[in-house]
Amino acid sequence: MAVRRNQRILRPEPIQWRFFTMLGAIVLVFCALIGRAAWIQVLEPDRLRHEGDLRTVRVAHDEVQRGNITDRNGHELAVSVPVQTIWADPMRMHENEGMADMRRWQALAEVFQTPVETLIARVEDPSRRFVYLKRMVTPAVADYVRQLNIPGVYLKNESRRFYPTGETNAHLLGITNIDGQGIDGIEAVYDGMLTGTPGQRRYRKDGQGRVIEELEVRQALLPQNVQLSIDQRIQTLAYRELKKAVSFHGATSGSLVVLDVHTGEVLAMANSPSYNPNNRHSMQPHQMRNRAITDTFEPGSTVKPLVILEALRQGIIETDSTINTSPGWFRIGGRRVSDMRNYGELTMAEVLAQSSNVATSRLALEMDFEELIHAYASAGFGNDTGINLLGESMGQLSHRNRWSDFEIAAFSYGYGLGTTTLQLAQMYAILGNGGVQRPLSVLAVDTPREGRQVYPPELTAEVLQLMEAVVSSDGTGRQARVRGYRVAGKTGTTRKAVPGGYGDEYVGLFAGVLPVSNPRIAIAVMINEPDGDTYHGGSVAAPLFSTVAEGSMRILNVAPDDISARNIRAAGFGGRYD
């Protein structure tokens, strides 16, 4: 026992460097944790907030339908209808074995009229969360897809643009793309008005799906409806008759415009050929062109009333003056200006009635030519009409310093300048409005925009009376007569320009105003490249003018101003005025 007490008890000495190493490591770990926590919560907290929001914050939208387009009487021309779109969530589909039963996918491909391989290729990537399978399907197709009950395939509410009037208003209204954005016509020009802003509600949900916090509520901005100046009754009449005329004469195309002479509103704007905006599978790009505002042509004899008006204004002639056109032709610088035959001595009314090139050429050569160009410009040639439609052409009106005598002569009967059907209608609306030019409008207006006096009112009244001779029994436009109404108009027939000169294709024209005693509407008709030997404006365009003008007077309930005319039917009576 003594030996044990004398023995020293040996204890292990701690290794100092290990202790401090562990202590330092622990301190570094704590510092790193504190630094990371400070970085996440103080310096860069947005990332975690974003991650949290992805799990708890939801956004709900209030869908807003596109605004309607109506005519001046409230008839709907373009509306949005609710439809459904088929979409898929590939990730959810692969998680729930949505591709296990290929019979369902085969049925889906058949109803979509799409190869099944194409549909499968769209959903092969399991990392994707959204892919369209078919946009804007019919209710029957949507119900069929719902019954297939394929995991990961869902339906989504959307809207589709529908045009009740079909091809009648296609060029004027334009179309929207598949996302409801206007890409042509009225749909594009007034896209901002027609498109509203969907409402949005952001809220936070807990793990049980309960709403625990409202984060943001944004009210929907409702779209506006657009009311056009178009009278659908006149528009339907104009398109139907234009389509028949183009087909009957074998023409390549045609346009017709009806204007309210007092307000500048467009009551009808029709083109043929047209297209059905509700069925775009067979739609061709050339069919979408609004020819009434895009296609230019030389107006021919339809501008002769302006030559007479300017000659009256410059004091070269009086309304009862005569001009000798014998022998029915003359030469200018080696080139020939001629009439259909030798008309001899003509009054101013007969100059228009017979459409004498010789007479108007001689008048143009006597007057101040710069003033004549100014008269053409005042009619709207070479400028926009103010209608605010996509693709409108300004036409062509040269302002050269030097003109040859033959160019001046040709200018007087409508060669050497370019115009559109709308511009031609505007010219006659100015004559019917007492020489006042107003900007044209395709929107219905409560108060007409302020006009500009471009021609003396007394002279325009005299020219209108002279133009009545055109539709007399001896005039070139006798087929444009309208029973019970006085008509002032002018025919036009021009050869189409080709490289190096003029070809063998023609443009038939007629433009006019009625009723003359109190003008209400102006109508311009253009028939492009009629087939066969019948191509004159008095034969192809004048009858169409008569039909549309007579129907428009009835639709607008305009009282007759020529009750002395024969064969006038009275409402409610079986007899006629004789």
Image: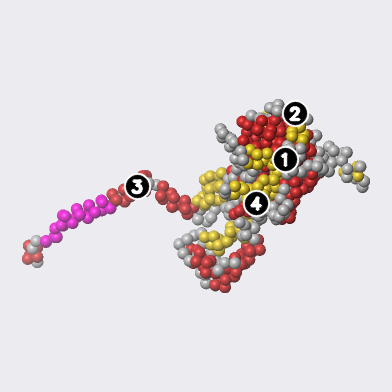
Earlier-in-chain disc, 4 versus 2: 2
- Which residue sits at x=37%, y=44%? 42
Residue 39 disc label:
3
Residue highlighted by disc 2: 318
Type of amino acid at the residue the image marks with label 2: Glu
Image position of 335 (left or right of 321) = left
Q: CA distance from mark 2 to mark 1?
A: 22 Å
Earlier-in-chain disc, 1 versus 4: 1
Earlier-in-chain disc, 1 versus 3: 3
Type of amino acid at the residue the image marks with label 3: Trp
- Which residue sits at x=25%, y=53%? 26
- Circle 2: is it few (<14), some (14-19), or many (20+) Cα within 10 Å? some
Q: Position of residue 377 (x, y in %)?
A: 63, 34
- Circle 1: is it few (<14), some (14-19), or many (20+) Cα within 10 Å? some
Q: Nearer the viewer, residue 254 or 57?
A: 254
Residue highlighted by disc 4: 504
Q: Assess whether residue 10 is covered by the magenta stretch.
A: yes
Q: Position of residue 398 (x, y in %)?
A: 58, 37
Q: Nearer the viewer, residue 317 or 265?
A: 317
Earlier-in-chain disc, 3 versus 4: 3
**Residue at the top extreme?**
315
Type of amino acid at the residue the image marks with label 4: Asp
Image position of 333 (left or right of 344) = left
For the residues carrying marks 2 and 3, which lies nearer the camera in this image? 2
Q: CA distance from mark 2 to mark 3?
A: 95 Å
Q: CA distance from mark 3 to mark 4?
A: 84 Å
Residue 328 disc label:
1
For the residues carrying marks 1 and 4, which lies nearer the camera in this image? 1
CB under 8 Å between discs 1 and 3: no
Question: Which range of residues does the magenta coloring cover?
Answer: 9-29
Residue 437 disc label:
none
- Which residue sits at x=67%, y=36%? 361
